[in-house]
Image (tube, rainbow, N blue to C red):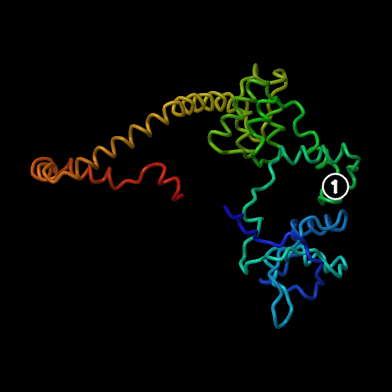
Amino acid sequence: MSALPTAFDATPLELALDRLLPSRPLPKDLSATRKYEQIKVSMQEIGLIEPLSVTAADRRSGLHMILDGHLRLQAARELGYHQIACLCARDDEGFTYNKRVNRLATVQEHYMLLRALERGVSEDRLARALALNIESIRRKRDLLEGICPEVVEILKDQHFAIDVMRHLRKMKSARQIECAELMASVNNYSVNYAAALLAATPPEQLCDPDRPKKFRGVSAEQMARMEQEMSLVQSRFKAIEQSYGTDVLNMVLARGYVAKLLGNKAVVSYLRRNQPDFLDEFKAIIATASLDEEALVT
C-alpha cells in the first residue's frame, strides 16, 4: 500500500518578505485588532512559532502566493524581519491546517501555561508574549483551584470563559458535577448560563452557605423563585434526557412503518376512499425529516 502524499514540503524555507505575495487584501483597521496585536507581541517576544503556508514559486516572477499567514507577514514587516520561515504547498490550493484545528480548550491552555511556568518562564514574559496583563495570566494559572477532578474531565475539551470556573468554584463538588453535566448536555458553556446555575443552587450546596448570593438587579424573593424554577427545569430536562434515545428510536421505527404502508397501492387507495385525513397525516409524517437529518441541516 503506497503512502499518502503530503500536502507540504517537510523542510521550511527562509524566504525574503518581498518574494511573498498576499492572496487577499487586509482590512484597514488590522493593526487595531486584538488578534493581530497578540501575534505581533508573540513574534516580538519569542519569535515565529508557525511558518507561513505558501504556494510554489511562480515560474515567471519567482513569487510565492500566501495561503495562510497574512497577519504573521504583516507583523514581520512591522518588526523589521528580512526573511521568514515558510512551508511550500505541493498543491496550489487554499488548504491550511488552521481550517482543520479546533480552538485550544481552556483547560488545555491552563496546563500549557503551568508547564511554561514550571520551566522557568516568568509571568511577565508570558503576559508580554500573549498580550495579556499579569492578572489575566494568574487567573488562567489558577483556573482549576477549587474545581473537582470530575468537572475537569467533563470540561477538558471545551472552550469557555474563565468566569465560568469562578461560578462553579462557589459550589460544592456534587453540585459542580451536576452543573457541568447540564452545561455539556445543552452544549452551553457561557458565563451567563453558569451564573444562572449558581443562582439556582440551594444554599446547602454552596461552599459558603452563609454568604448570600448577590446578582445585580435581583431581589431575594426573585432569587428564591429562580432557584425553584431552575430546579424544576433541571428535573424535567433530566427526565427528557433519559427517555430521549428511546423516543427517537420509536419515532424512526414508526416513520419507517408508515412509509412502508404507503408504499402499498391498495392501502393508499383504501385510505383515500375511507380515511383521507389519515392519509394526509401519514404523508406529512413521511415528509418530515428525521431528527438526525434536521440536526445536520442546521
Against 133, is 156 above or below? above
What is the crowding at mark 1: few (fewer than 14 residues within 10 Å), some, or many (at least 20)? some
Which residue is under mark 1? 127
Q: Residue at x 75, y 26 (%)?
A: 146
Residue 105 x, y percent position in the rendering = 68, 42
Q: Amino acid at mark 1?
A: Ala
Q: Residue at x 39, y 29 (%)?
A: 246
Apparent side of residue 284 relative to residue 230 in the rendered image (left or right) = left
Q: Say which element carries label 1.
A: helix
| Residue 137 vs residue 197, the one in the foreground | 137
Q: How many marks?
A: 1
Q: Residue at x 71, y 63 (%)?
A: 53
Apparent side of residue 295 relative to residue 17 in the rendered image (left or right) = left
Residue 173 x, y percent position in the rendering = 67, 21
Residue 176 x, y percent position in the rendering = 65, 25
Query: Quadrant of the rendered structure where residue 178 is?
Result: top right
| Residue 263 vs residue 285, the one in the foreground | 263
Q: Residue at x 80, y 55 (%)?
A: 49
Against 229, is 65 above or below? below
